[in-house]
Amino acid sequence: MNKISTQKAFIFLGAPGAGKGTFSQIFVRKFGWVQLSTGDLCRKHIAQGTDLGKQIDFAIKSGKLVDDVIIIDMVSQWIDEHIKMAPGIIFDGFPRTLVQARLFLELIQKRFSELVVNVIQFEIPDSLIIERLSARKTCSNKQCQAIYSLLEQSTQKSQKNGICDKCGSVLIQREDDKSETIAARLQIYHQHAQPLLDFYKNHNFIIHRINAQAPLQMVQSELEMIAGI
Ligand code: AMP
């Protein structure tokens, strides 16, 4: 099997709503990187009504994690189908558990020739996450999944109320962005974040802590600097 020549990668590690999806989309648009969002992949399966989608629907809606084996299969398949000559790749919301991190390590050793992985830890207080997620709207078109905010001070407001600027579809609130589910997702994130960071440290990954409350442009510049762009 030929090894993939993509050389740069980010692992975005952060609570839901910390900005991982937003910055992934900027890197995709601006630099032609590819984004592997396991959350987006899961939602696509559900929207298409696949067998897998039916299996994972409950976990997603209740804010729980999807089974590691299912996620790893999805990721391997995605890499086979999508990653060709992209200059960089963002792992957005993956790995989420130690089991996934171990398999991730095997996967990159097997499939990539010389991938430099920077772990980006998005730091942001839970109170702000709750505010952001409660005001987050997502494009209902599963091929688009653009993210918007209803917050007054946000730079991510859609131009037409309730409509996606990119594809014209209706904006909706994700089922798991409803307040009952946010607490469960935050709790799961905190339970796994430190063991993952310890794992990355023990395997000599470079970890960067980013203040995710800073203005969007500032965070973006910091990420570009880390990526050497
Ligand atoms: P996200 O869009 O990354 O916030 O993910 C939404 C939901 O998809 C999560 O709350 C989980 O139910 C599921 N999910 C996404 N990525 C993973 C993963 N790497 N491992 C397990 N479950 C995941």
Image (tube, grey):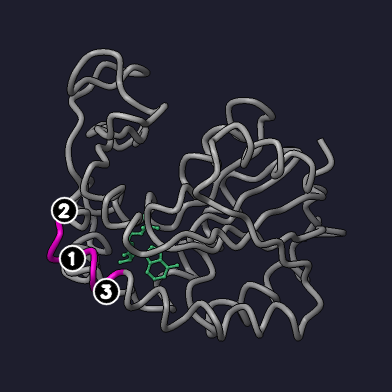
Q: Is residue 7 above or below residue 16?
A: above
Q: Quadrant of ligand 1?
A: bottom left
Mark 3: give few (<14), some (14-19) or many (20+) Cα within 10 Å: some
Q: Residue at x 35, y 55 (%)?
A: 128
Query: Element under label 3?
Result: loop
Q: Amino acid at mark 2?
A: Glu
**Residue 222 location (% of width, % of height):** 71, 43
Contact check, label 1 and label 2, Cβ < 8 Å: yes
- Residue under label 1, please give it: 181
Q: Which residues are magenta?
A: 178-185
Instruction: Tell me which residue sits at (27%, 57%) in the image.
Output: 130
Residue 183 drawn in magenta: yes
Q: Earlier in the sequence, mark 1 or mark 2?
A: 2
Left or right: residue 19 compared with residue 177: right
For mark 2, give the secondary structure.
helix
Amino acid at the residue labelled 3: Lys
Q: Position of residue 115 (x, y in %)?
A: 81, 58
Circle 3 residue: 64
Give whichever of 208, 200 is nearer the camera: 208
Q: Which residue is mark 2?
A: 175
Q: Position of residue 31 (x, y in %)?
A: 69, 29
Apparent side of residue 168 relative to residue 202 in the rendered image (left or right): left
Q: Which of disc 2 and disc 3 is earlier in sequence? A: 3
Q: Residues within 10 Å of mark 1 (few under 14, many from 20)?
A: some
- Disc 3 under 8 Å from ligand 1? The reply is yes
- Secondary element under disc 1, as helix, strand or loop, is helix
Q: Decide: marks 3, 1 in contact (CB < 8 A)?
A: no
Which quarter shows the C terminus?
Answer: top right
Task: Choose top left, top right, bottom left or bottom right for residue 180.
Answer: bottom left
Q: Is residue 129 magenta?
A: no
The answer to whether residue 84 is above or below residue 176 is: above
